Image: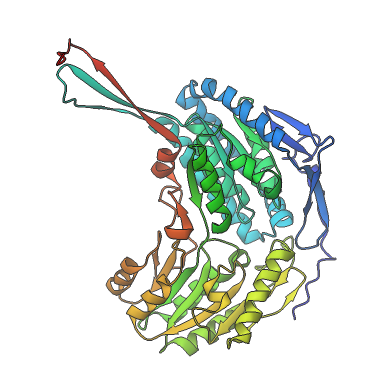
Amino acid sequence: MVAVDTDSVEEPDIDELDIAPDDGWNALYVDGEWAPAGDRDVIEVENPATRSTLTTVPSATEADVDDAYEVAAEAQAAWADRPPQERAGIVNRVVSLIDEYADDLATLFAVECGGVGLKAGFETELAQGTIEVGAGLAMRRTGRHQESVTPGKENIVVREPAGVVGVITPWNFPLYLTSRVVAPAIALGNSVVLKPDENTPITGGLALAALFEEAGLPDGVFNVVPGYGHTIGDHFSGHPVPSVMSFTGSSEVGRGVGQRAIGEYTEPALELGGNNAHIVLSDADLERAVDAGAFGSFTHQGQECISINRHLVHESLYDDYVAGLADRAEQLPIGDPLEEGNIVGPVINESQRDKIVGFVEESVAQGATVEAGGDHDGLFVEPTVLSGVTNDMPTACNEHFGPVAPVIPFESDAEAVELANDTEYGLSGSVHSSDVSRARDVADDLETGMVHINDQPLNDEPHVPFGGVGASGIGRYNDEQILETLTELKWISVQREPREYPY
């Protein structure tokens, strides 16, 4: 078992970071005010590498949620009336501030969600990209004229802000997955109420609130209410005020969020789980496929909805692929994210660790073989490669959300497609082949929202549609697709000439 030394790493005082509010992070952010915890319960924010408490934040109540939605509703109309270049300018200012506070944000990523330096760089770049694209939408909230079948009538279709947008985000890429909704929503003239995941209330919400505050966003347009899902989640997602409810997280929780939102005639935007297949065809470049497979399985400890969940490898390449992937897994440096050079950090908490370890143990009991890893030290789970896996084993049929690479053999392209599609999920995937046309044929047959040829599934670009099918969600994020979600069309007709009626 790998032994991870975290005692030699000096833990920062996150309340002293430049980005922190004057009174630290122990506050809600509602109507432009940092409201202290008072007599509310608090959430202990823990460093997953050391298990020490970094700080506490208030655990919002249902009354806090009501207040935040009320404030957002009151602020929205005046904000929507601001010129689009003003809205875009404030949002773009956040991009510059992320550069200014990049080191502080990297520290927060490390100590709050276990993100190593490589991951911090990815997330910062993704957040800045999605905010830039979101800001640009302010100038693209356009309408159109359409012909009328009625003489003398003018048809005008205008696009208006949806109103108040509710946002629930997860802990794995907290700043980015929050920014990809909040930035376009605000740029388009909406107001926002955000509930970040209780594991990452700072990087998932409060830090972004501090950035928008410094950028000059008017009070009430963006509000953050940290809280436990079991305490305020149902009330938040089933609230009558928001017009859109954005949720990123597990399919199980997302189903309930969507049902409650629809019950209030709120449009749900759901990006949920995945069981993504990395398909290596018989003519694939083996080294290239292994490189992609290692990156797609072990980046940020496999804690991404678009990470590789299953490696489907043609039987002629199977043994060599397993050996190559196992060798890669064993060489990855594991340790505290604050230590430079570490590639694999801790998983987020004990519950997540126990689920991952349980899936591995159950798969081994059913006949899988551990080729690399398979053990853990605290929350540090070793990058694990399993051979002899079948599609119905726990590491393959479940979204394991960990640094685990189950490798499954197949005989034909048709069988690979059948195995890949044998899941309720349909988020992402990848196909490797030296014949791009052959790979494209396989990609076309995959029942998934995204497929990447001669790459791996960890791809997201802020101007390209992102989302899945089936249990992987409803709707798409990014650029024009999120614009459609965050705005409403209104038909206005003008009868320019007197109209003849039949009575």
Q: Eyeballing the image, is 79 above or below 375?
A: above
Q: Is residue 10 visible?
A: yes
- Give the residue at the far front of this rendering: 503
476 and 269: which is toward the camera: 269
Measured as percent of width and height from the top left, residue 192 is found at: 57, 34
Is residue 330 visible to us here?
no
Q: Choose top left, top right, bottom left or bottom right for residue 173.
A: bottom right
Q: How many marks?
A: 0
Q: Looking at the image, which residue is at 56% across and 48% down?
A: 257
Q: Describe residue 191's horizontal placement relative to residue 114 as left or right.
A: left
Say how the picture is coloured: rainbow
Q: Is residue 271 left or right of residue 107?
A: left
Image quadrant in which you'd find residue 21: top right
Q: In the rendered view, tell whether residue 308 sits above or below residue 72.
A: below
Task: Return the residue found at the far top.
Answer: 498
Q: Is residue 157 above or below residue 458?
A: above
Task: Please identify the quadrant where the C terminus is shown.
Answer: top left
Q: In the depicted view, which residue is nearer to us: 274 or 19?
A: 274
376 over 367 or under it: above or below: above
Residue 412 x %, y %: 34, 83
Quarter of the N terminus within the rendering = bottom right
424 or 111, nearer to the observer: 424
Q: Name the residue: 70% across, 37% down.
A: 62
Provide residue 106's location: percent of width, then percent of height.
68, 52
> Horizontal and vertical percent for residue 13?
82, 48
